[in-house]
Amino acid sequence: MKKTFALFFVLFCLAHPATLFAGALAGEQVAQGIELLILPVEPSIAYARDNQPAQREAAHTQDARPTTPSTNGKSASSEDHAALDQNAENNADAAQVGPRISKKGGAPAEIVVLRVDPKLVAFELHLASNTGKALSLEEWARSQDLAIATNAGMFLPDGLTNTGYMRYNEHVNNGRIVKNFGAFFVASPIPGAKPQLKSAAILDRQADAWEDVLPNYGLVIQNYRLINEKGKPIWRPDGKSFSTSALAQDADGHILFIFCAHPLNGYNFARAVLALPLHVTRLMYLEGGTPATLILNTPQRRQVWNNSGMLGGLLPPSPIPNVLGVKIRK
């Protein structure tokens, strides 16, 4: 199976000239410090039956459980589980039309990656709890001149509060550290902070001294981790399937914005990312289902990736309260 996928991957790369090999996997340079890669999902993962995965080795750790996607601007809170489960089942059903749709786009299923060099960009959080108004992701990107924009994470039914800890400089959106959320994205080191701090990083609660590190960053987002510190998927392999947006960190310290429209459960999504030559060492969930969206907004290329193709493109843009953005340093 690995040899089959290797051949499939090479053929895919030949069909997508932006995906080149130069020692490491390289992509299309769409702005200073930002590369775009569009990569294939291994077919055995893309079309695996959710309840019959190839391997059932997910560890039952603090955050090794499936999360249903947000719907209608609400997060996967306990009050909404019945409706969310139904939404996830609908998304899982949409997977059956994947092969038919894929004939128009080439590969059976694709993962979009925006690889960012943290030393060349600035990370920002734009929060409705700070501005007083939630906007669509496109409006956030346009009004704030963001080169990259994505939903910063699941949010509570109040339409403002992130489900995990979230802080941007002095503004605290959610001051509670959630026990079951095993990852933090941190960026914007505070002036005068420890000199060895990275410009941005994903911290693993089980492996990193996060309690000492968080106060030294101006931007902090907490959410589920998708892999453990050993690089193994940890979500249940029988979870619901949906489109997914996530953040990753690679072995060279790049931050990767990742989006997959093809419905996968969290376990298979992690497997799909790890199967690619991206050298991912940390992988953090952001959002699933309809709110999962990724925007690239640079002079070289402007594009929106979401699951509207899977849903027939009938859903209007929904207000997003919390947006993680990237700006090119001047």
Image (spheres, rainbow, N blue to C red):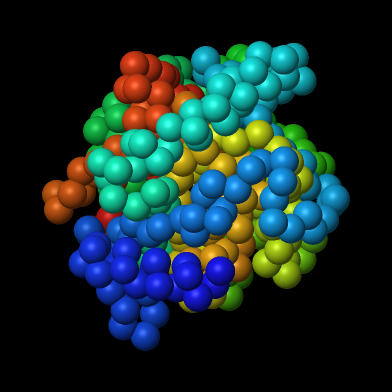
From this viewpoint, is residue 56 visible? yes
From this viewpoint, is residue 168 visible? no
Vertical position of residue 209 compared to residue 183: above or below: below
Question: x, y percentage for residue 206?
Answer: 79, 60
Question: x, y percentage for residue 148?
Answer: 33, 46
Q: Residue at x 28, y 50 (%)?
A: 106
Image quadrant where one finds the N terminus: bottom right
Left or right position of 121 against 191: left
Question: x, y percentage for residue 151?
Answer: 47, 35
Q: Nearer the viewer, residue 6 or 271?
A: 6
Vertical position of residue 248 compared to residue 220: above or below: below
Q: Residue at x 34, y 42 (%)?
A: 102
Q: Which residue is outermost to the left?
A: 299
* Number of marks present in the image shown: 0
Vertical position of residue 107 compared to residue 282: above or below: above
Left or right position of 322 against 88: left
Image quadrant where one finds the C terminus: bottom left
Question: x, y percentage for residue 302?
Answer: 20, 43
Vertical position of residue 85 compared to residue 169: above or below: above
Q: Residue at x 36, y 36 (%)?
A: 100
Left or right position of 210 against 137: right
Left or right position of 315 against 322: left
